Image (tube, helix red, strand yellow):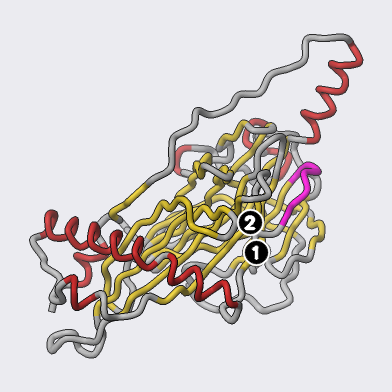
Amino acid sequence: MMIRAAFAALAFASTAYAALFPPTTSGHSTGSGQAQAKDSAQEREGRGALAILRRDGLLFPFASFNRDSWQVTWPIDVEQVKVPTTLQAIPEKWWGTRAPEQWRVRLMAGEERTIAPMAPQLFSIFCSRRLGLRTDYKAAQPPPGGVTNPYPKDGFAMTGNVPVEPIESMDPSSPDWQTLTLALTKEFERTEAVTVNGVKIRTGWRHPLPDEFRSKFPVRMESWYRSPTDNPDWKVSYVELVRQYPPGPEDQGCGLETLVSGWVHLQNGGVRKTTLRGKITYCDRVGATYMLPFGRIRPKDRWYWVFQLSGWEDEWYDVALVGANEVRHVIEVRAGNRMCF
């Protein structure tokens, strides 16, 4: 049987079809005093910081924004900084905005509330030590006992007053679910072929099932997240699909699987563009990555998705610009991983 750890070390193969767009920059008005005051108000309304809310009440700030300009100001590597013991001792530049007295929280079920930070606190994500904020948040469900990774998230938090909109989680029982699955089958097979060939080139491993035999097994969509765009004819989705194969004689009852995930641009319900990546693994899915969407915001002119990507091995927090013709990651923070040294 193939060593599964080798699969965990393999990178995703990609088939990307999106064009690259240059980042936008923000400017200040140079007109009358009234125009400058208006611009200043708009800047205040379009500024803030983002943080992940864990079920144990810890916040982990990971990004700040000034309209359509994004940056990571909170320290990720605590080994490189002096860890403060009080809120007042936190350097102002770490916030990326005004030091917050409260955070607005959007819970996974859509409820919004405010919570207050109490003190800095060190914690672990997999093998990585991180600096968070202890808060007065009390979860409806009890936190898990022992070491749990990925740790349950109850939502995400923001400073400032930019509204938060939901990312729609589609219903598997809806007619559109099967329609999109069938529409993506050819792209799935193309991505699977590219991924299998990439594994062969890097490791010499050959898939035990030929292409024509693999195509006999159905593609199943496991997750589908969707949002509108500024163009009413276009919607953007993130999907997670799988094709499962029966175990071989040396697979110990756990057969191979092909996982494909990525972005799908739909125009009037039809697939117009995809950016997909594939992963070959076994049924235990070592190396698989899954999205947990938190919400989307529009600090100025563009919409951004806020989400987590995580699996058995690591955890990322992302912000992506999502438009009718593009998806571009503007923040990617690797929060922790299982590689302990």
Name the residue furthest left: 204
The image shows residue 273 at horizontal and vertical percentages of 45, 50
- Eyeballing the image, is 268 above or below 260? above
What is the x, y in percent for residue 304? 62, 45
Label 1: how many Cα within 10 Å (few below 14, some 14–19, many 20+): some
Residue type at tag 2 = Ser
Task: Answer with mark 2 or mark 1, whichever residue precedes in sequence.
Answer: 1
Badge 1 is on which residue?
168
- Label 2 belongs to which residue? 227
Image position of 321 (left or right of 125):
right
Q: Amino acid at mark 1?
A: Glu
Give the residue displayed 32% in from the left and 70% down from the top. Answer: 286
Residue sitting nearer the eye, 82 or 284:
284
Task: Please rate how many residues cluster around mark 2, counting C-alpha atoms within 10 Å: few if below 14, some from 14 to 19, many from 20.
Answer: many
Residue interval drawn in magenta: 159-165
Mark 2–mark 1 contact, CB under 8 Å? Answer: yes
